[in-house]
Amino acid sequence: AQTVTQSQPEMSVQEAETVTLSCTYDTSESDYYLFWYKQPPSRQMILVIRQEAYKQQNATENRFSVNFQKAAKSFSLKISDSQLGDAAMYFCAYRSANQAGTALIFGKGTTLSVSS
Amino acid sequence: EPEVTQTPSHQVTQMGQEVILRCVPISNHLYFYWYRQILGQKVEFLVSFYNNEISEKSEIFDDQFSVERPDGSNFTLKIRSTKLEDSAMYFCASILSGSGNTIYFGEGSWLTVV
């Protein structure tokens, strides 16, 4: 079974600085997707960024980028120029591409606080 | 942008009562999911639904839980006899097709069992 591990329960960053959230996963599959979701205090799940395992190029969405290391099974999220609105719980998630409709598997989350 | 909608946003119920949580997935989506998040914990998969039947379920999804799509638009989660430990945020989600596309989440239904 696949597992997702986020080893940092809490992280903090100052406004305008850069922070990296770690995620590792375990799978025997070669084809899958990885995601970072943001959960602000409203508790809504908001997709931040996604990465297809077959793509070598790291995904980027504005201030958010990932460092995808397939061999190491590592998928970290970098937030540049941090803003107060980035404060939230961040979940790393895995989804198999081998079977239609498979569910997301989440890590335990990292709470990010941003200070001014 | 199309969105997944859930009702109610918050429900308080007495232990032993039946609860139905409702979801309207995005209209052309084919797979539907329920997830649960106990306060302060990770998001856990409950069940997935495709073509009017359960396609996958977790160990959490026992006989107390059921899902159905009664009218082609709503997707419901029923908890037959609620327990204190059922208190959680319940998220509905949907996806266009089986692979590749992003899973979209609703805003959640916060269930408090007293």
Image (cartoon, coloured by chain):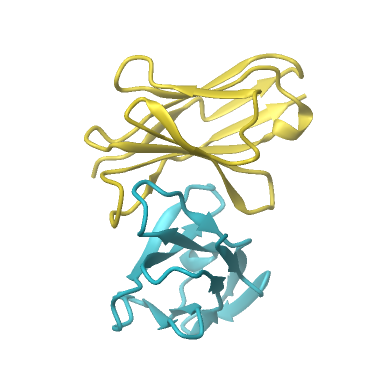
In the displayed structure, would residue B83 be above or below residue A91?
above
Q: Is residue A80 visible?
A: no
Residue B11 screen position, x and y as percent = 61, 24
Residue A63 screen position, x and y as percent = 36, 77
Q: Quadrant of the N terminus of chain A?
A: bottom right
- Residue at image position (28%, 54%) is B101
Q: Quadrant of the C terminus of chain A?
A: bottom right
- Residue at image position (64%, 17%) is B80
- Residue at image position (65%, 30%) is B62
Whether residue B11 sits left or right of residue B9 in the image: it is right
Picture mark count: 0
Colour of the chain lettered B: yellow
Q: Nearer the viewer, residue A112 or A94?
A: A94
Q: Nearer the viewer, residue B61 or B39?
A: B61
Q: Is residue B96 visible?
A: yes
Shown in cyan, the chain is A
In the displayed structure, would residue A68 be above or below residue B61?
below
Whether residue B72 sits left or right of residue A64 in the image: it is left
Residue B59 screen position, x and y as percent = 64, 40
- Residue at image position (73%, 26%) is B113
Whether residue A82 sits left or right of residue A6 in the image: it is left
In the displayed structure, would residue A86 be above or below residue A11?
above
Whether residue B48 sits left or right of residue B73 in the image: it is right
Residue A101 screen position, x and y as percent = 37, 46
Q: Nearer the viewer, residue A8 or B34?
A: B34
Which quadrant of the figure has residue A13? bottom right
Q: Nearer the viewer, residue B10 or A14?
A: B10
